[in-house]
Structure formats: C-alpha cells, structure tokens
Amino acid sequence: MTTAVADQVDSAAEVALRAGGLTKRYRRLLPKRTEHEALRDCSFQLPKGKVAALIGANGAGKTTLLSVLAGLLTPDEGSVATEGRVAFVAQEKPVYRHLKAPDLLRLVAKLNTVWDAERAHDWLTRFEVPLDRPCGKLSGGQQAQVAFAVAVGSRPDVLLLDEPLANLDPLVRREVMAELLTEVEASGMTVVLSTHVVAELGGVADHLLLLAHGGLVVDGDMDELLQSHVHYVGPAADAPPGPGEVVEARHRGKQSTFLVRLPEDQAAPVVAAPWTVRPVTLEDFVLAQLARTRKGGRA
Ligand SMILES: Nc1ncnc2c1ncn2[C@@H]1O[C@H](COP(=O)(O)OP(=O)(O)OP(=O)(O)O)[C@@H](O)[C@H]1O
C-alpha cells in the first residue's frame, strides 16, 4: 500500500484525475541494450466520484499505468495531475509481515496526515480479519483486506487498485465492491481498478479504460459505449445488414454475428428479418475489443 500526493488539478472543473501523453519505457541492458515501451501516449481524464475499470490483456500496461498515476514510477513523457490524496493498493500487497493488523494501522496512522482509524478498523472487522496474528500468517485474501483497510483509512480522493479482487473468494469480491461503492457515494472518491474479472464490473464501473500494447484504445462512459454498439445476428454473411463500423465479426455454421459501432446520433437500427439487432453487454464489448487489439488493430 502506497499513498502518494501528485500535482493538484483545477477542482472547479470537477476533474479528479488527468493524465496527459503518458509514455513509459523500460530499459534493459542485458543481454543487450533494449527498450520496451510499456505505455504509449496515454491521455484521459476522470471526473470526481467515478469508478473506472482498467482492462487489458496480460502485459498491456495496466500496472505500469497505475504505478505512474500513483507517482511510484516516473513517466518518460507526459504528466499526471490529481486532486487531493491518492492511495494505491498494489497487485502484490506488501503488508509488514511481522506486524499484527492493528499494529500496522497504528504505524500507518503516524505516517498519514489524514487518517480515519475507525474506518480502517471497521473494514478489518467487517471482513473478519484475524487481529491476533502477524500479517505474514494471514491468508492472501486476508492480507488483501489489510491493504484495503489501510487504503480506505487514508481517506483518499483517488483510489488506485491493481487487481484488487484477485485473492478474494466470489462472495467477498461482491461484498468488497459493494463496500467500495458505498465509500464512493459517501465521499465522492474516484476509483480506478484494473481487473480481468469483467463479469463483476456490471453496476460497479461507470467508465472504461482499455489498454492494448501500452496504448489506450477505449476511453469512455460505460453506458454510452454500450449504447453506441449493437450486435446484428442473422444468416451467414460477409457484411452486416445495417449501419456501423464492424468491431468483430463471428461466423458459426449458418449464423453470422457482427458487433458494430453505430455512427454518431444513429437511432436504434431496424433490419429486415431474419436479421435481429441485439444489445451488447460489457463482456461482449470488452472481449471484442481484446480480440481486435490482439490482432494488432486499434479501436
Ligand atoms: N520492471 C520492468 N522491466 C522491464 N519490463 C517491464 C517491467 N515491468 C513491466 N514490464 C513490461 O511492460 C509491459 C507492461 O507490463 P505491466 O505489468 O504494466 O502489464 P499488465 O497489463 O499489468 O499485465 P498483467 O495483466 O499481466 O498484470 C509488459 O510487456 C512487461 O513485460
């Protein structure tokens, strides 16, 4: 768990987080001098009180982006501006192994200028984290809960979470998301969370950031993205029966399915039978974008 404070943004604009032209290259000297561009010219901004899902294939650059946003990695180009305090719960949650959770919270309280001890303790109690054992002897999920307690206790304005659900069982995953949403509603906090568990983002995330090969290929309001895409489902065909740019075409036996992005201001299209127009779910959309970008295209 790391807390960092970055440059301040203009709070009047109600923007909580602004990234401009972020590029990050990793350098290797051995076996020969090479550079790998893990982030490429990423620009986006998030309004206050939004929950943004950060999605991308393995190695797409999610951890790198979150680390740059948290101020833990310096970008080679570009800048980050955030309003207020930023907390980051990293993928590996390095809680101090020899300290019990309450002792860890007391230590963190001394290191933070703003600290809500009650909120942090409530989180540990709510998720039944054993308090009488060093953190190193807690399960992976319990250690994750300690990292969450530290994060919410620091009352961040921007909370960055790198695969926060990875070690948690399905029921606890749902409860953690509900608890975070309550926190967002109560405090106006902005959250960016990277995850591969797309199915669990419904009703949680209201903004989508999708990275592919270090580039931001989707940046938009979740509802608008889903409303501006449809599926055409019908008999085997080379092209869709209605308007829109094809994002993904699937052909199975005698059936074709086209996921298309509708032209701007296009009302719901009507197609002649046997074709049908169907809505696109978040999972459909994300999988289509991942498949498309895996083949080297850009959304
Ligand atoms: N310290 C490093 N040195 C060199 N290359 C790195 C380093 N950290 C990450 N990379 C490379 O940068 C790219 C982006 O890595 P990153 O960890 O940000 O991806 P990710 O989207 O978080 O992946 P995952 O979903 O697997 O966690 C990958 O190709 C990775 O191999």
Image (cartoon, rainbow, N blue to C red):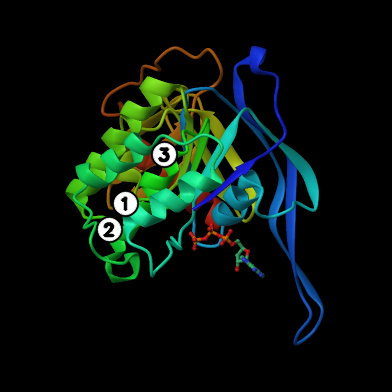
Residue at disc 3, secondary structure: helix
Task: For marks 2 and 3, give the one nearer the viewer.
Answer: 3
- Disc 2 marks a residue whose amino acid type is Gln
Residue at numbered disc 3: 153
Q: Is residue 293 above or below residue 234?
A: below
Label 2, label 3: how many angstroms apart (C-alpha)?
Answer: 16 Å
The numbered mark, 2 or 3, whose residue comes first in the sequence reads 2
Residue at disc 1, secondary structure: helix
- Disc 1 marks a residue whose amino acid type is Gln
Residue 298: quarter of image: top right
Residue at numbered disc 1: 145
Label 2, label 1: how many angstroms apart (C-alpha)?
Answer: 5 Å
Identify which residue is drawn at 43% across, 60% down.
93
Residue 4: quarter of image: top right
The numbered mark, 1 or 3, whose residue comes first in the sequence reads 1
Answer with the quadrant where ligand 1 appears in the image. bottom right
Residue at numbered disc 2: 142
The answer to whether residue 66 is left or right of residue 198 is right
Q: Position of residue 95 (x, y in %)?
A: 42, 61
Q: Point out the residue furthest to the bottom here.
A: 31
Q: Look at the numbered disc 1 and say if its residue's Cβ is closer than 8 Å to ligand 1.
A: no
> In the image shown, does 257 or 18 lie closer to the viewer?
18
Q: Position of residue 219 (x, y in %)?
A: 57, 33
The answer to whether residue 162 is left or right of residue 18 is left
Residue at disc 2, secondary structure: helix
Q: Which mark is residue 80?
A: none
Q: Is residue 266 above or below residue 23?
A: above
Residue 135: quarter of image: bottom left
Label 1, label 3: how many angstroms apart (C-alpha)?
Answer: 12 Å
Neighbours of disc 1 within 10 Å: few (<14), some (14-19), many (20+): many
The answer to whether residue 275 is left or right of residue 49 is left
